[in-house]
Image (cartoon, rainbow, N blue to C red):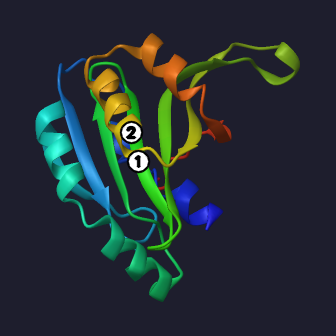
Amino acid sequence: MLTAILLSCSTDKKENMTTGQDKFTWNVQLAGYDYSRADQKGETNYNDFIDEFEKFPWMEQLDSYQKIQSGCSPTMSVKDLKTGKDFWVSMGGDRNNHGYLIGYIYPKEKQGFFGLGKPKTIRWLEIYLTEDKNLVKDCFKLFFDRNHDQLENKIRKLEEYGQMEAKDLAE
């Protein structure tokens, strides 16, 4: 399941860079989708996204994943085209025992080998665990408000699932 969840946060290669456009876009990956596949939903704002989050068939998607046992877990992702940051939520487990994984992807400077060479900017992924649906919605509000300091403070108090360089699986 770890692989399914970690790979479910892929974004389109075309949108991995900052475009400077002051807008947010979102996508969905249903249970069992190939990791490079996402249904692009277009432009959004906080209220419309949360409406979709509430309507999303999380339990049915968990049931589907339990039957399929391959591909990605159900995931909803938002990309901020102005900052190049992403925030996503995925659900793992089953109908009786489940939780959310939240992922935050942001540009980070990486030093060269042994600290030598020119640093480069990479996309860094931090993943945290929670069972609190309201906390997930609060985090999305901070993301849409571009209140990154408060968002980072809030998520970094949660149980950490992992950190790594974000991979664009559509490459």
Secondary structure found at label 1: strand
Quarter of the rendering occupied by the N terminus? bottom right
- When the figure is inspected, residue 145 is found, relative to residue 55, above or below; the finding is above
Residue 125 falls left or right of residue 15? right
Q: Which disc number belongs to residue 149?
A: none
Looking at the picture, how far across and down is residue 117, in whole percent? 77, 14
Which of 40 and 69 lies nearest the eye of the viewer? Answer: 69
At 44% from the left and 54% from the top, the residue drawn is 90
67 vs 30, left or right, is right
Q: Are marks 2 and 1 in contact (CB under 8 Å)?
A: yes
Q: Amino acid at mark 2?
A: Val
Q: Which mark is residue 136?
A: 2
Name the residue furthest right. 114
Looking at marks 2 and 1 on the same chain, the residue that comes earlier in the sequence is marked by 1
Q: Nearer the viewer, mark 2 or mark 1?
A: 2
Residue 75 at x, y = what percent? 38, 56
Q: CA distance from mark 2 to mark 1?
A: 8 Å
Residue at image position (48%, 33%) is 104
Camera-side residue: 43 or 20?
43
Q: Is residue 166 visible?
A: no
Vertical position of residue 73 compared to residue 166: above or below: below
Residue at 17 percent of width and 58 percent of height: 55
Mark number, residue 89: 1
For mark 2, does the 10 Å Cα neighbourhood hold few (<14), some (14 to 19), or many (20 or more) residues?
some
Per the image, label 2 sits on a secondary structure element best described as helix
